[in-house]
Amino acid sequence: MEAKELLKQHIAKTVSLSEDQFDYVFSHFTMQAYKKGQAVISEGEKVNHEYFVVSGCLKAFYITDEIKMYILQFAMPTWWTSDYGALYNQTKATINVDCITDADVLRISNEDREKLCKELHEVEHFFRWRTNRGYLASQKRLLSFMNNDTKARYEELLAMYPQLYNLVPKHLIAAYLGVSRETLSRLYNGHR
Amino acid sequence: MEAKELLKQHIAKTVSLSEDQFDYVFSHFTMQAYKKGQAVISEGEKVNHEYFVVSGCLKAFYITDEIKMYILQFAMPTWWTSDYGALYNQTKATINVDCITDADVLRISNEDREKLCKELHEVEHFFRWRTNRGYLASQKRLLSFMNNDTKARYEELLAMYPQLYNLVPKHLIAAYLGVSRETLSRLYNGHR
DNA sequence: GGCCTTACGTGATCTACATCACATTCGTAT
DNA sequence: ATACGAATGTGATGTAGATCACGTAAGGCC
């Protein structure tokens, strides 16, 4: 499916826009193609856009002490990603985003999103609900973190996104779960 | 400060409403007084409202196996709370909310919120930003969970909300941090 | 092809925290 | 004031997972 149609159907799940309205909205997006490994947002940079994933897989992650990496989000097609803290507060990025595979994304600037939200009530509604769902997912993950041990979280993740098992290297899954790659390795190889 | 004024100023931080508009919005809220220990939302119940805290302190928490409690949020004045998963998806509550101290809250029904969001673009804008901030806070807490050890999270929490130290029993702070009360006790008594 | 970086497996050891057990202190109701 | 449940302190012990150390396998790239 082409990018425009994908975004259209994605938005249509939450709000109804006329053909003209959607075309107008879409005119504020820019298509970008990235290569595997390429950075989308790097720590310390200014963040001006958020990204709608059309194809491929991205990761949003945080680096501590130049050593440990924690993955906040794997972004798959129809997911949105950015460093939202930096984007909304107009501060430098503290989160990195890069591409696990080659990827096509549609990007929109912060100003354009806010402009569209102001101009079209439906667009503001759409973004409210999108954030809602993100908030709920984040809260659910937080609970899972407190509640479950690593094995349970690992199985939960794979049950939710089976594609990940073949798509992303295991050490990235470990970084998402918040455990060392060694622990994850032992886990699904049945040791201990 | 009276409840109406508190809500007014809270909303005014994000959007400008005329006097009449705010009065109209406010007419959809109902004042509720709760006693210390009283339940606001109980697991398994239908959830119809969200709550704006005027005074006192509430907690939103999750119970596992009838044994372990994890606190998702302490809700202080000008904070909003509910079981948002149940509220938005119209399912039974999985989260409990109750009062740590006597508390006054303003509640609004899910339907009224959605109605106001539809009628007044500014109100939708307000709720989008409120959720935004909640999402960012949740993400930050998630990172802190993966990143920091218990001691660092404890100090982070107290730095952010010093009132909690005297207001809330320690075992609830432990339940927020996701550690046992024993570990927390040893922590700030300098053992180990 | 061969090279070299990245991914992955697995043992040994160490550590933060959970859990159990019990003592003590505090709050609140009668 | 007394009493009883809730909150807290603290020891002993067990365990999940981190860390270090090393080896093997698998992709990119010249």
Image (cartoon, coloured by chain):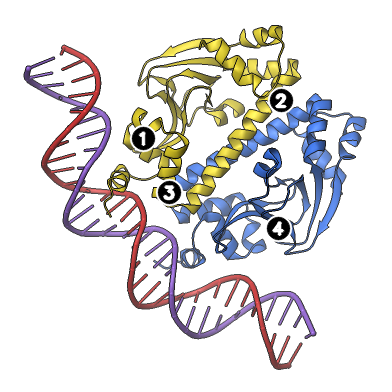
Chain colours: A blue, B yellow, C red, D purple
Q: Is residue A51 visible?
A: yes
**Counting other residues with Cα less than 10 Å from the Cα at mark 3, is it few (<14), some (14-19), or many (20 or more)?**
few
Q: Amino acid at mark 3?
A: Ala
Check chain identity for marks 4 and 2: say if they share one: no
Mark 2, residue position: B125
Q: CA distance from mark 2 to mark 1?
A: 34 Å
Q: Amino acid at mark 4?
A: Asp
Q: Chain of mark 1?
A: B
Q: Nearer the viewer, residue A132 or B94?
A: A132
Mark 3, residue position: B152
Q: Amino acid at mark 2?
A: His
Asked if labels 1 and 4 touch by Cβ distance under 8 angstroms, the answer is no
Mark 4, residue position: A98
Whole-percent x and y of residue C20?
21, 48
**Counting other residues with Cα less than 10 Å from the Cα at mark 2, is it few (<14), some (14-19), or many (20 or more)?**
many
Q: Amino acid at mark 1?
A: Leu
Q: Earlier in the sequence, mark 3 or mark 1?
A: 3
Q: Is residue D6 above or below residue A44?
A: above
Residue A41: assigned label:
none
Check chain identity for marks 2 and 1: say if they share one: yes
Q: Is residue B49 left or right of residue B182?
A: right
Residue B172: assigned label:
1
Q: Quadrant of the C terminus of chain A?
A: bottom left
Element under disc 4:
strand
Q: Is residue A122 above or below residue B21?
A: below
Q: Nearer the viewer, residue B39 or B31?
A: B31
Q: Earlier in the sequence, mark 2 or mark 1?
A: 2
Asked if labels 2 and 4 touch by Cβ distance under 8 angstroms, the answer is no
Q: CA distance from mark 3 to mark 1?
A: 17 Å
Q: Is residue C30 left or right of residue A157?
A: left
Give the image quarter of residue C6: bottom right
